[in-house]
Amino acid sequence: GGQIIVSARQLKVERGTEIPLIDVRGGDAQCSIKSKGVGGAGGGGFVGFNWTEQDGSPDDHADLNDMLEIKTLGGGLTPTCEDILPLHAREEVQGSAGISASVGLCRPGTAGPFCVACGVGRWSGGVYGCRRCRNKKGKYSVYTT
């Protein structure tokens, strides 16, 4: 797991180079044949982006989705664990996935670690990701396409 916080106004990644990786995957489960012991895998960690635009609200950094890789997976099973654990027990010892998000508020209509615009039929107040629209057009809503 672990935690990584990136505080930046912008990130520049050169196109055509190897994609940078931010990795907070959990550690793998450990199993011992000799002692018949099992240690559960670690949960994935947290990657947070604190975008520091002058007005305090980040722009859409959608281009980073294709230019930066983030891994927040929970830990898995080692080959020893796969050999000794019955199928029904394997899921119980795997680590849960972590998350990546914007640490600050995104602009309304955007969400995620890079404050990317929500898709058609979805909305966001700037936190908690994009959600499906469930209401009718009214005096307090603006629909975009």
Image (tube, helix red, strand yellow):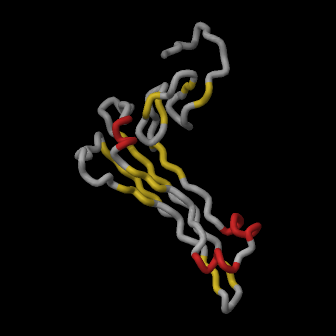
Relative placement, left or right, of 95 versus 112 is right
Q: Quadrant of residue 63?
A: top left
Q: Quadrant of residue 30?
A: bottom right
Instruction: Identify whether 134 is placed above or below 30.
Output: above
Return the x and y of residue 120 as percentages of the image width and height.
53, 22
Return the x and y of residue 3 as percentages of the image width and height.
46, 59
Q: Residue at 26%, 46% (x, y): give it.
A: 13
Return the x and y of residue 40 as percentages of the image width and height.
64, 72
Q: Residue at 60%, 30% (x, y): give it.
A: 131
Relative placement, left or right, of 23 versus 85 is left
Relative placement, left or right, of 98 versus 23 is right
Q: Residue at 29%, 40% (x, y): give it.
A: 9
Q: Residue furthest top?
A: 139
Instruction: Identify whether 50 is placed above or below 41.
Output: above
Return the x and y of residue 135 as percentages of the image width and height.
66, 17
Instruction: Identify whether 115 is placed above or below 44.
Output: above
Q: Residue at 53%, 14% (x, y): give it.
A: 143
What is the total number of numbered labels drawn onto the structure image?
Answer: 0
45 and 87: which is toward the camera: 87
